[in-house]
Image (spheres, rainbow, N blue to C red):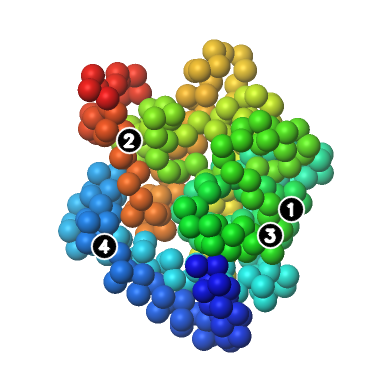
Amino acid sequence: MYGWLCRLSRWACGLSPAAAARWGRWLGRLFWLLVPPHRKRLARDNIRLAGIATDPTEIARIARESALRFGPLAMEVFRFPVTAAEDLPARIVFEHTEAVDAVEAAGIGCIFAASHAGPWEVLGAAVASRYSRLVAVGQHQADEGFDRFIREARERVGQTTVYSRSMRDILRLLDDGNKIALLCDQDGGSSGILSPLLGTVALTVTGPAVLSYSRRVPIIPVDIYADSDRYRVVFGEAVYTRRDIDKRAAIAEMTAYLNECLSRRVRAVPEDWFWLHNRWKWTRRLYGDPLTLTTTSPRKKDS
């Protein structure tokens, strides 16, 4: 896998920007053709569950558009070796940078709460082009070659990658003044907590809230929007997990806040989110119907 990805990257780096854009759109259409039918149904079911749309034609359009964006995203990553230094930063506009500028000036750590809404790999590259010491926390990919390629691609744009299993290492990185980027919109699994999301209740990861509570560092939500070959990166306000209330309640409160930020982002441009992901898998498995749950619902007896 690694060798093939490197060859694709060399080929993409030799393209003109216009040709790369055309091939990116073609890759997106190819990706959609290769998505299995059950995954397409899952995407449509997720859109319906979240109340994004009710018309079947509109639901199908959103599902398709959300998959087509993977082509341009892949092409951007393939072209990092030739775009990271000058071309890509020139195509990025940053908005509401005050909170991050303050963190950078103070030399302290912070947590970026990001999501799979928009081209998330470009988001990491964009933030790393402006701010120092960015560490992306990711999941180790099953294919070693693919994992190596992604890690090297991130390194080219100034990011370090660590894996989410080592909480102690992440805490040390925060103590040393690093900025930790977390994608916190995927299924929280059995270790997550029930939290409101898009009109449902869903198991949600608590990493950002826990890290902020443990080290008293700010969380800064961040989003990226694509407009043709240009990008807009929008930072939110710096927020802290409260320490004047019970720890469990404070973590639940912050997790709900971050889910509300995500919900607003998804509703604004639903085509941007990763609807192919089985976001409510563990919620259904362990608790039941996401539309009828509350944040205090008990686990099913057979789970």
- Amino acid type of the residue tagged 1 in the rendering: Tyr
The residue sitting at 52% across, 74% down in the picture is 4
Picture quarter with the C terminus? top left
Lower sequence index among marks 4 and 1: 4
Which amino acid, mark 2? Trp
Q: CA distance from mark 4 to mark 3?
A: 32 Å
Q: Residues within 10 Å of mark 3 (few under 14, many from 20)?
A: some
Instruction: Check disc 4 and report its element: helix, strand or loop.
Output: loop
Closer to the chain start, of discs 4 and 3, is 4
Amino acid type at image mark 3: Glu
- The answer to whether 91 appears left or right of 64 in the picture is right
Residue at (63, 70) in percent of width and height: 80
Marks 3 and 1, how far apart in space? 14 Å
Total marks drawn? 4
Please say if the residues under marks 2 and 4 sit with CB atoms less than 8 Å apart: no
The residue under label 2 is 282
Choose the circle earlier in sequence order: 1 or 2.
1
Residue 170 is left or right of residue 249, and the answer is: right
Decide which of tag 2 and tag 4 comes sooner along the chain. Answer: 4
* Towards the viewer: 12 or 129: 12
Q: Nearer the viewer, mark 3 or mark 1?
A: 3
Q: Which residue is mark 1?
A: 131
Q: Is 53 in front, or is 107?
A: 107
Separation of residues labelled 1 and 2 (CA atoms): 36 Å
Label drawn at residue 155: 3
Q: Are marks 1 and 2 in contact (CB under 8 Å)?
A: no
Q: Which mark is residue 36?
A: 4
Give the Cα distance between marks 2 and 4: 21 Å
Question: CB of mark 2 within 8 Å of CB of mark 3?
Answer: no
Horizontal and vertical percent position of residue 257: 49, 33
Give the residue type at disc 4.
Pro
Mark 4 crowdedness (10 Å alpha carbons): few <14, some 14-19, many ≥20: few
